[in-house]
Image (cartoon, helix red, strand yellow):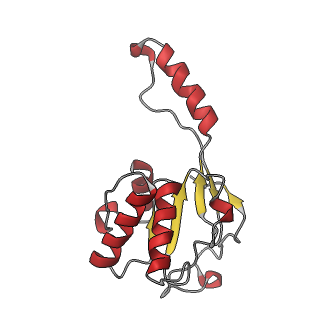
Amino acid sequence: MAGVASALRQHGLSLDDLPVVHSDFTRDGGRVAAERILRHHPETTAIVALNDAMAIGVLSTLRAHRIPVPERMSVVGFDDVSVAADLAPSLTTIRLPMTDMGRMALSLALKPRSTRPRRRPTGHLLVVRDSTGPAPAALPPAARADGHRPEPGTLTRPTA
């Protein structure tokens, strides 16, 4: 959540201004969260799930409600699980270097507590696929201030 809040701040937004729904980090947790969002925040145009399993649950709920993705609602996950590209629509996700993160965690665990850094950057990669698009009432991609919107299936690195 700290990373999401930081990215929002970089774009002049605040996490405090957006609905945050807490749920289990499972497919069913994503379904429950999506139901809550649809019921309590029907104006929502995008959902960021904190893992791909939750995002798959969100997509399932949106499909059950016949809410078109991404035309009405965009969905993003984290992890880039192997089936993310095979879903319909394919899932936009943040790829994390899980092997490197595991290696780093073990290395830190083996160090004396006093020498462990509190935080260490791990890197990530945005994998843009078909589950995201412009907000329904937003300007078309060509009219954006920076004029950039990655094409589905492209990989991009964040600028910050």
Instruction: Please name whichever residue, 77 or 104, is drawn nearer the observer in this view of the structure.
Output: 77
Judge from the rendering whether residue 134 lies leftward or rightward of residue 41; answer left or right. right
Image coords of residue 101 (percent x, y): 57, 34
In the displayed structure, 54 sits above or below 106; it is below
Image coords of residue 21 (percent x, y): 31, 62
Q: Residue at x 53, y 83 (%)?
A: 68
In the displayed structure, 48 sits above or below 97; it is below
Q: Residue at x 44, y 11 (%)?
A: 112
Question: Which residue is farthest top?
Answer: 112
Instruction: Please name whichever residue, 3 or 133, is drawn nearer the observer in this view of the structure.
Output: 133
Q: Residue at x 31, y 70 (%)?
A: 36
Image coords of residue 121 (percent x, y): 53, 37
In the displayed structure, 72 sits above or below 18; it is below
Does residue 43 appear in the picture of this structure? yes
Does residue 13 appear in the picture of this structure? no
Q: Residue at x 61, y 53 (%)?
A: 80
Instruction: Please name whichever residue, 77 or 17, is drawn nearer the observer in this view of the structure.
Output: 77
Tell me which corner region of the image, top left, top right, bottom left or bottom right, holds residue 65: bottom left
Image coords of residue 124 (percent x, y): 60, 47
The total of numbered circles placed on residues is: 0
